[in-house]
Amino acid sequence: MGSRKPSRRLDELSSAIFTEMAQRKREVAQKRDVIDLGIGSPDQPPAPHLIAALSEAVQRPDVYGYPGSEGSGAFRQEVAAWYQHRFGVGLNPEREVHALMGSQDGLAHFGMAWVDPGDIVLVPDPGYPIYAGSVHLAGAELYPLPLRADRGFLPDLVSIPVEICRRAKFMILNFPSNPVSAVAPLSFFDEVVAFAKQHDIIVVHDLAYSEMAFDGYRPPSFLQADGAMDVGIEFNSFSKSFNMAGCRIAYVVGNAEIIKPLAIVKSNVDYGVFAAVQEMAIAALRADRTGLVANPTSSLYQERRDRFLAALARIGWDIEPPKATMFVWAPVPPGWSSREFAFALLEEAGVVVIPGNAFGSEGEGYVRIALVQDSEILEEAARRIADSGILGRKQNQV
Ligand SMILES: *Cc1c(COP(=O)(O)O)cnc(C)c1O
């Protein structure tokens, strides 16, 4: 009894809202110019010294074999050296560092490595889509951790029912976070370690925005918390920190026993990151660690944040400035749903943003705006929003 129905896993995988937004965007773009602040992909190229390192590496005849999924010794040593320099965290490059083809790769495969049907995973809501995706792909269940403004978008660990804690195998955290652009103090990570030890739950921290923070703020590593190495791992990526999203390189660090099952899955599904790309990544960390080249990422996004939020404030839309990430998590004006407001911005102002509930039901009442255009274009987006008259519309009706 053959049938062409794809696996049930797929039903849970994609958010209908993303698909619908993309479709409407294509339709509107045929009629007018559209400013896309929806995508979470950096618009800048890597620094010249990184492109040079890649160009040099591709000339070498020895980089074209299967690289091996754990990453080269030199790559893992450089990651360990950078973690020591940046966070004061000591790592064993052999056992506590593993290369990834993007954090996405690590996150997508971590569920398969660790959970079975019947297990529970604690997932932030709203959260980056692959967190829930990883749980669905593994056939496990997720329990959402609401991130709400009144708690500074930190999950309330105490409110998780004991029965859920008993069945939970791991929890995912992400600070600075996408989409809510919130940050967590080290004291929160201390609380997480105590919670994880009490309930024997693995902690998976996604630190994709460690190098994209503003006003002198430097996001901590989860592994800086006392005892974190006993309970957790951390993903970090070159995509946002060094504008290398297309290069597909990242890594996981932390507890060796937690990394090992992920390494086994990966050694069966891929053969590693192109060796020339690993050389480029080594150059990025080394230049940053030795202070050879200043990383311009934070100052660029800080300027965009400041100019865009100033322009929005002038037209009456006041938004709390984020301390990190390339996202503005903006409350929608009274009277609108996230979805209605995002579609109105698209149709009437030609500005693409993502409705907050695309990232989970707790995202209702917000839209995510990505600062992935030059400041002038962001200011133009604010002008178009003002001209559309959307902001004042419902307030006048109420
Ligand atoms: C962009 C992003 C990633 C993606 O990382 P890759 O290394 O490019 O796969 C992971 N986590 C979050 C929260 C992100 O925003």
Image (cartoon, rainbow, N blue to C red):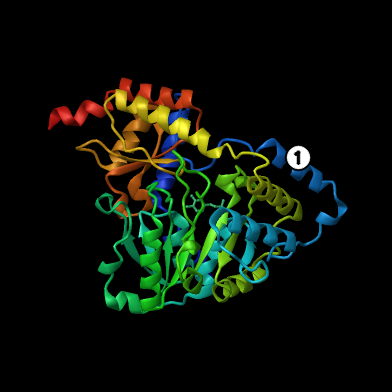
Number of callouts: 1
Q: Which residue lies furthest to the right in this view?
A: 61
Quadrant of the rendered structure where residue 255 is?
Answer: bottom right
Seen in the picture, residue 319 relative to 133 is either above or below; the reply is above
Q: Which amino acid does label 1 sit on?
A: Ala
Seen in the picture, residue 28 relative to 54 is either above or below; the reply is above
Q: Position of residue 64 (x, y in %)?
A: 81, 56
Q: Is residue 57 left or right of residue 1?
A: right
Seen in the picture, residue 190 relative to 290 is either above or below; the reply is below
Any part of residue 120 in sight: no
**Residue at x 50% of width, y 55% of height:** 207
Picture quarter with the C terminus: top left
340 vs 240, nearest the viewer: 240
**Residue at x 71% of width, y 54% of height:** 278
3 vs 322, nearest the viewer: 322
**Residue at x 60% of width, y 54% of height:** 85
Q: Position of residue 79 (x, y in %)?
A: 64, 58
Any part of residue 186 in sight: yes
Q: In this view, does 266 lie to the left or right of 215?
A: right
Q: Where is residue 49 in the image (x, y as percent from the top left)?
A: 71, 39
**Residue at x 33% of width, y 49% of height:** 357
Quadrant of the rendered structure where residue 385 is?
Answer: top left
170 vs 194, nearest the viewer: 194
Seen in the picture, residue 66 relative to 21 is either above or below; the reply is below
Q: Position of residue 232 (x, y in %)?
A: 49, 69
**SS at mark 1?**
helix
Q: Name the residue under label 1.
A: 52
